[in-house]
Image (cartoon, grey):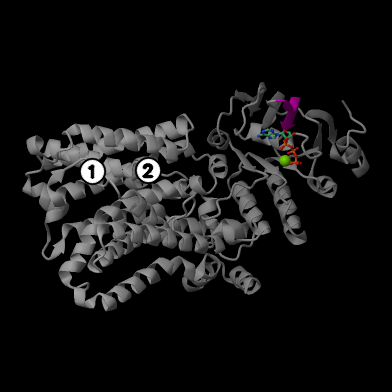
């Protein structure tokens, strides 16, 4: 691709004491493209996402957003740079309700300047906007006032995805977003991803389901024991190819 | 039920407020959330009957209960935030004493406002140190605040050689304990003010939501960019400040500052908060529940005295009641 990547990570390494989770891995995400990040359990996918989302600091390597290098030192920083993430652990807050989760740390306030200073919540507006956003995304939740902890696993996941999609204008990282979803909801998430792609968002999708990769991804990067072992354009490969990369039977170098 | 409400929701957008409330009520703990209020009514009714001849319901006795409850309620509101954030503050009793002494020291020469601000300022400082050590040095707050309890009570004992410091300022005493609005004791007004502010802070301020988020799941809160370290520090500051204000209320009512004020409040305060529906381990809190819990504790205390128990027996009874009550409310919490 000739255009500047929305996000480029170059030579990322990260270890946890004795475990080297990532070894010199580079990835590029482009506007309007969906990139799959594949690999077996423990291959380092979530670690990569956490490095990009500001949760981990890589031991080596650099990260460029729209061509500019940034040391992403916190989740807040990543969000400010336009990187929105659904982590494997979801990051929804059980005792808060759906609307509160959607607006968590981006709360709408009322009462003018003073209300903004003290953080006086405009709950009504947040609920209304939340309802509009989720229905616009065709995500259905029984009640926005219900605490997220009382929702089903798939519904919680839908809230997390809704939040990332709603705020993710530039770069969206999805770490197994459909793991707990039923057939219909999964299809809806794939539609959402296609939608974001059409709107020019750069999407990174982690999944263990090869059909989903073939369905929505333009490009796939495969990790094997912390190293990048393959980087391919999805139209050029078959499911079997991907599986053999993932199991380490074969690589493109 | 769920399927139907999904469909209804899908067709109308937002459910009606009543529907929403019923839905939430059925899924989020239901009646269990109101246990503390039932308990309050039950204890009130029981004492009204069995202690009727001892004057339990007399207006002077009820007022007395309210006065007893005030410092506990104020401390409970602060403690609710510390617990909600996933921390605990064991230093609150000593902060009460410190605050009363600072107030007594300052009010005499500089007037009531300076006295108040100095007392609160000292308390904020203690909370800040508690919070900073907990977060930056990563020592569990129960250890930090236990150490702080020792330090502050030592300072308080040295302050005036174990002697009480008199407060001779009618305005201070009137505002913070001895006076009132007509027949309503100022202490009752302070319970309502502090409880109301706490409730608003928990439910209607960004800060309250962040405190709850931090205590519920710190990693998740971090992942959305909440500065959880700062949130935890602020929650410990809130708890210390509330304890400081409780110290002002005690100093006002008794017109003294003394090293042992608030000394044995800690267990009572924690019991009040937990009975009120706040999770001892973070992520769930109720300010109104904490205030109600404080009223329950004060009522029990008063009832035991009216029953004619010796001080030693009162202590035993109180300990048993607290453990039972907390055990019950924790079991309720686990089930919901
Ligand atoms: N916080 C941590 N502390 C220690 N080791 C870690 C930590 N996070 C990840 N690891 C290790 O790093 C390696 C990569 O983990 P990672 O979570 O990135 O895998 P993954 O590819 O996301 O796997 P999965 O498909 O199971 O989610 C694993 O060996 C894991 O044990
Ligand atoms: Mg993972």
Instruction: Kindly identify the residue that appears in the image at 17 percent across and 57 percent down.
Output: B186
Residue position marked by numbered label 1 in the rendering: B260
Instruction: Kindly identify the residue that appears in the image at 79 percent across and 47 percent down.
Output: A216
Viewer can see residue B227 = no
Give above or below for B195 relative to B165. Answer: below
Q: CA distance from mark 1 to mark 2?
A: 15 Å
**Count of numbered tags:** 2
Q: Of helix, strand and loop, which one carries label 1?
A: loop
Residue B169 percent across, percent down from the top left: 7, 45
Residue B168's quadrant in the figure?
Answer: top left
Q: Which residue is at the front of the view, B191 or B143? A: B143
Q: Quadrant of the C terminus of chain B?
A: bottom right
For the residues beneath circles 1 and 2, the answer to whether they share a chain is: yes
Residue A217's quadrant in the figure?
Answer: top right
Residue B50's quadrant in the figure?
Answer: bottom left
Q: Which residues are magenta?
A: A18-29
| Among numbered discs 1 and 2, the one appearing first in the sequence | 2
Q: Which residue is at the front of the view, B36 or B25? A: B36
Give above or below for B130 relative to B183. Answer: above
Neighbor class of circle 2 (other Cα within 10 Å; few <14, some 14-19, many 20+) is many
Residue B268 percent across, percent down from the top left: 34, 54
Q: Is residue B234 left or right of residue B304?
A: right
């Amino acid at each position: 691709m000739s255009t500047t990547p929305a996000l480029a990570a170059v030579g990322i390494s990260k270890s946890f004491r004795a475990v080297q989770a990532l070894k010199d891995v580079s990835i590029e995400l482009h506007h309007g493209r969906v990139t799959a990040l594949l690999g077996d359990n423990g291959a380092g996918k979530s670690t990569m996402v956490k490095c990009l989302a500001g949760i981990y600091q890589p031991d080596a390597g650099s990260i460029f957003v729209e061509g500019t290098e940034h040391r992403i030192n916190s989740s807040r920083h990543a969000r400010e740079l336009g990187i929105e993430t659904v982590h494997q652990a979801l990051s929804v807050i059980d005792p808060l309700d759906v609307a509160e989760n959607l607006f968590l740390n981006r709360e709408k306030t009322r009462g003018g300047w003073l209300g903004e200073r003290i953080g006086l919540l405009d709950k009504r507006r947040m609920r209304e906007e939340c309802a509009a956003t989720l229905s616009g995304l065709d995500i259905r939740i029984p009640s926005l006032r219900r605490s997220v902890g009382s929702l089903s696993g798939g519904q919680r996941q839908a809230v997390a995805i809704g939040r990332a999609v709603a705020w993710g204008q530039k770069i969206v990282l999805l770490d197994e977003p459909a793991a707990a979803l039923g057939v219909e909801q999964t299809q809806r998430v794939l539609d959402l991803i296609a939608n974001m792609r059409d709107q020019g968002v750069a999407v990174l999708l982690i999944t263990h389901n090869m059909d989903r990769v073939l369905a929505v991804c333009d490009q796939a990067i495969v990790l094997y024991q912390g190293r990048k072992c393959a980087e391919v354009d999805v139209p050029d490969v078959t499911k079997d190819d991907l599986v053999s990369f993932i199991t380490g039977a074969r690589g493109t170098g | 039920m769920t399927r139907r409400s999904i469909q209804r929701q899908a067709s109308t957008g937002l459910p009606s407020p009543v529907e929403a409330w019923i839905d939430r009520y059925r899924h989020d703990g239901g009646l269990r959330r109101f246990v503390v209020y039932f308990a309050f009514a039950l204890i009130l009714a029981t004492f009204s009957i069995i202690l009727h001849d001892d004057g339990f319901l007399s207006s002077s006795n009820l007022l007395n209960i309210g006065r007893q409850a005030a410092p506990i309620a104020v401390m409970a509101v602060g403690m609710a935030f510390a617990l909600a954030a996933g921390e605990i503050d064991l230093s609150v009793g000593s902060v009460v004493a410190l605050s009363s002494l600072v107030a007594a020291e300052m009010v005499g020469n500089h007037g009531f406002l300076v006295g108040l601000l100095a007392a609160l300022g000292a308390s904020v400082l203690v909370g800040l140190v508690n919070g900073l050590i907990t977060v930056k040095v990563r020592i569990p707050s129960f250890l930090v605040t236990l150490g702080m309890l020792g330090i502050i009570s030592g300072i308080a004992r040295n302050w005036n050689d174990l002697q009480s410091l008199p407060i001779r300022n009618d305005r201070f005493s009137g505002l913070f304990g001895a006076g009132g609005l007509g027949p309503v004791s100022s202490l009752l007004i302070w319970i309502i003010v502090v409880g109301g502010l706490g409730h608003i802070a928990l439910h209607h301020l960004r800060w309250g939501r962040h405190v709850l988020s931090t205590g519920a799941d710190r990693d998740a809160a971090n992942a959305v960019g909440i500065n959880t370290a700062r949130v935890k520090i602020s929650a410990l500051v809130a708890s210390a400040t509330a304890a400081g204000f409780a110290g002002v209320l005690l100093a006002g009512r008794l017109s003294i500052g003394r090293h042992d004020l608030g000394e044995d409040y800690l267990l009572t305060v924690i019991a009040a908060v937990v009975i009120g529906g706040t999770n001892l381990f973070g992520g769930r809190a109720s300010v109104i529940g904490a205030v109600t819990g404080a009223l329950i504790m004060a009522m029990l205390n008063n009832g035991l005295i009216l029953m004619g128990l010796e001080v030693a027996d009162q202590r035993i009874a109180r300990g048993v009641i607290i453990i039972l009550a907390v055990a019950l409310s924790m079991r309720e919490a686990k089930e919901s």
